[in-house]
Image: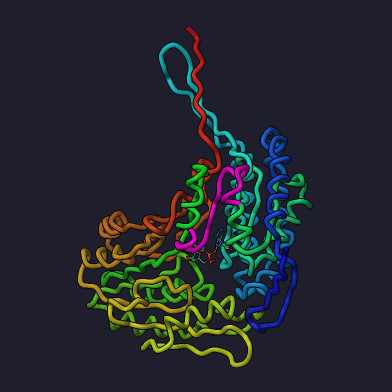
Amino acid sequence: MSTLLTLRNPATEAVIHEMPHATVDDVDAAIAKATAASPAWRKMAPVDRSRLLRRFADTVAAHADELAEIETRNMGMPIGNSRWCANMVADVLHYFSGAVEKHTGSSIPVAGGVDITFHEPLGVVGLITPWNFPMLMASWKVGPALAAGNTAVLKPAEITPLSSMRLAELALEAGIPDGVFNVVVGPGSTVGWRLVEHPDVRKVAFTGSTEVGKRLMKGCADQVKRLTLELGGKSANIVFADADIEKAAAAAPGAVFDNSGQDCCSRSRVLVQRSVFDRFMELFIDASKAWTVGDPMSPDTAMGPLVTAGHLAAVRQFSDGLETVYTGEVPTGPGYWHPVMIATPAYDAPVCHEEIFGPVVVVIPFDDEADAIRICNDSIYGLSGSVWTRDGSKALRVVRAMDSGTLSVNSNSSVRYSTPFGGFKQSGLGREHSMQVLDHYTELKNVFIATD
Ligand code: NAD
């Protein structure tokens, strides 16, 4: 029996939408639709599949403002960021529309004949996404899945499903055939899990917490189901004494407070060389004062609320009683508000090691290059990170030594749809973005043809 899903605006706590949860039968029906749509979609001439995806991208671009408003009301992301996300969704779909005809196989010299490889679509893929960048995370999976010739069933986070539901409508409007891109909305433990256990789903692509990722890995083992995982992080922003300290400090707040810290790539550990620690802190605190918290519908707001009362309580488990060197202000009245916080706690405090997923940053001093690398790698995670230095050789030495998948030098920006994205260690398995992701949405087939 289905139960009612009640969605609230995190900035006002007002109910914005009510709808029934999907049931396991609904998931089975969506998988059946995707299975029925699969043969025609995979056989479609690549140029036609490419054209339909391009039209989907154009349709999203034409509805960017509408999608942005949906996202802000449902998730609390500041409207400027939501617009940026909506336009990036269109760009991601554009990129993968162009990839359809470029993901080529190879011919391999062998004795007695020819050997050729094909990238075959998997069939139906299950896509499970989190609530922190709802439509963006959906596009990162839907774009490559469909481009590779698969059909998809997407299960967005049940608290922020509205933009994903609208994306599926826009796909239909753009001419993507019915059944190719399906959305089911409901709890992970039932609706999401059905994608793991259903034998007709050939792959699960998951973005979410490390804890749930591990559960999915065990669940997929029974059928040796293909699985990619984009999981949690506790990324390090390493600032050496020879860096442009002003620039590093000015950029540091955005790397952790953006999206209220609800970002897997958040640089929530800032490691600063001891000799410039005090100077950096002064500048960092000063720059953080611009991170005003307020109405996410206002274009002047830098940071909105956290997503739900439950998530606010989870973040407060770390921040309540935390001794800080700077704490910002929050609006009064309804809304799931949390201020930005900068702390310099003892290294063994949980706040230095666990993913908080909120606007709380720790700053840790280090002595030299080896010390910075040791602290950086002292984590179960390895998703993202940055290095700030004017010494090019040092920058290269350090990024090569960091156990993280997605890094930047003299910048905190490391995520682009045209470059591989993903984590080391418990931050994930496989990669998203770039042409490489298409390998994760296809099987490699090898055929020998005898000619002698
Ligand atoms: P979550 O793991 O609680 O949920 C993610 C999705 O999985 C949701 O759709 C949820 O309903 C579903 N789910 C939960 N239990 C399930 C189950 N048993 N079977 C199938 N599906 C299930 O994560 P969240 O709280 O939505 O998102 C925050 C986490 O996501 C953070 O840890 C963050 O670091 C991570 N994240 C990672 C990336 C990345 O690219 N590496 C990006 C964004 C978020």
Left or right of 160 on screen, residue 426: left
Does the image show residue 247? yes
Q: Vertically, is 352 above or below 414?
A: below
Query: Between 228 and 83, which is closer to the camera in this rendering?
Result: 228
Q: Vertically, is 77 above or below 229?
A: below
Residue at image position (60%, 50%) is 126
Q: Position of residue 337 (x, y in %)?
A: 56, 84
Q: Is residue 172 magenta?
A: no
Query: Between 339 and 418, which is closer to the camera in this rendering?
Result: 339
Residue at image position (68%, 47%) is 31
Does the image show residue 435? no
Residue at image position (24%, 64%) is 374
Q: Is residue 201 magenta?
A: yes
Rendering quarter of residue 403: bottom left
Left or right of 404 on screen, residue 123: right
> What is the basis of the colouring in this image?
rainbow
| Magenta range | 195-213
Query: Between 269 and 321, which is closer to the camera in this rendering?
Result: 321
Q: Position of residue 200 (x, y in %)?
A: 63, 42
Rendering quarter of residue 271: bottom left
Residue at image position (70%, 65%) is 21
Q: Vertically, is 15 above or below 3?
A: below
Q: Position of residue 159 (x, y in %)?
A: 63, 70
The residue furthest bottom is 332
